Image (tube, rainbow, N blue to C red):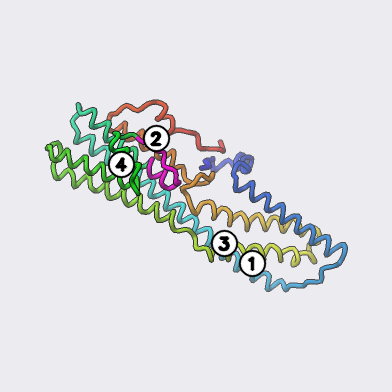
Amino acid sequence: MIVYKTGDWWKALWHFHTSEVIRLLLVRVAVVGLYGTAIAVAGLKFHELNIRIGREYFSFLGILLSLLLVFRTNTAYDRYYEGRKVWGQLVSQCRGLAMELNALLPREAHASRRYFAALISNFPLALQGSLRNNIRFDKLEATPDIMERLRTAENVPTTIIAVIMESVEQLRQVEIFDSVHLINLKVHYVAMMAVNGTCERIKATPIPYSYSFFIKCYITIFIMVMPIVLLETCGYWMVPITMIGAYAMLGLEMIGNEIENPFGYDSNDLPISQLSNKIRVSVHDLLNVELAEEKRALATVPYSVVH
């Protein structure tokens, strides 16, 4: 995720090329510039273009395109922001569960505290891997029998919640926990499962293909028509004017494509790796369990590319 100081425009502009989307966008804008140059040379030097398109009709097409782009951008950002909200909820719920267990577990129960700290920390790490189709089991901490169960599970985050619930129930049976405590803990289980379901829904429900194809086709046609409409009045200035317009239209569409799935590895996606490691640090601190420094350091990895 790109983090930057919102008030420092110049540094933000200086580092804008660090985004893969921007680099690809500049290549496409350059292609549009070459196309515009070819139209300008053919129309002004060789006089081979006799196409006339009414400006009123072209303006009408531009209004329709602007509405489509607004809807496209808002739809993509809604998915991005919903993903950030549910991961914020996950941070709170994991911390809340750790606080509850810290209050209930005996201070001298060091093994149980390490056990639950590892299990709770496994949930965001497993969810992150599930959303990216790459669960790193070597990063999870559990006993061999639980680890084998996780490796064969269809849904690893759900299985982790099931293991936590089973472990809490075992403590209730030996009367370390009371039944009323299970009611308080259940709130956190349900909330964590809701986060898992919401993230899976966002990932598995992309923007409909027909809509995505339609807007890409519309933008392509509009950019191809633009130089022809502007050539008569703008001359060779039509080329940079067309490139600026293409920069805005293509850029909005490409940004929408990037953020509509906010759980990937793109530079503008959510920093769920950092959030997962922050949860692990918080959970271990709340349960008074020591965590290796190299694992703590992962929570403060500088994801910022604009300083």
**Nearer the viewer's eye, disc 4 or disc 2?**
4
Mark 3–mark 1 Cα distance, whole angstroms, equals: 10 Å
Disc 3 or 1, which lies upstream in sequence? 1
Disc 4 or 3, which lies upstream in sequence? 3
**Nearer the viewer's eye, disc 1 or disc 4?**
4
The residue that appears at 40% across and 30% down in the rendered structure is 295
On the image, numbered disc 3 is attached to which residue? 69
**Nearer the viewer's eye, disc 2 or disc 1?**
2
Magenta span of residues: 125-140
For the residue marked with disc 2, what is the amino acid? Lys
**Nearer the viewer's eye, disc 2 or disc 3?**
2
Mark 4–mark 2 Cα distance, whole angstroms, equals: 15 Å
Disc 4 or 2, which lies upstream in sequence? 2
On the image, numbered disc 4 is attached to which residue? 149
> Mark 1: few, some, or many residues within 10 Å (few <14, many ≥20)?
some
The residue that appears at 28% across and 37% down in the rendered structure is 145
Q: Nearer the viewer, residue 111 or 37?
A: 111
On the image, numbered disc 2 is attached to which residue? 139
> Mark 2: few, some, or many residues within 10 Å (few <14, many ≥20)?
few
The residue that appears at 38% across and 49% down in the rendered structure is 86
- Circle 3 — which element? helix
Task: Give above or below for 143 relative to 124.
Answer: above
Disc 2 or 1, which lies upstream in sequence? 1
Residue 67: give x, y in percent of width and height: 56, 65
Q: Are marks 2 and 1 in contact (CB under 8 Å)?
A: no
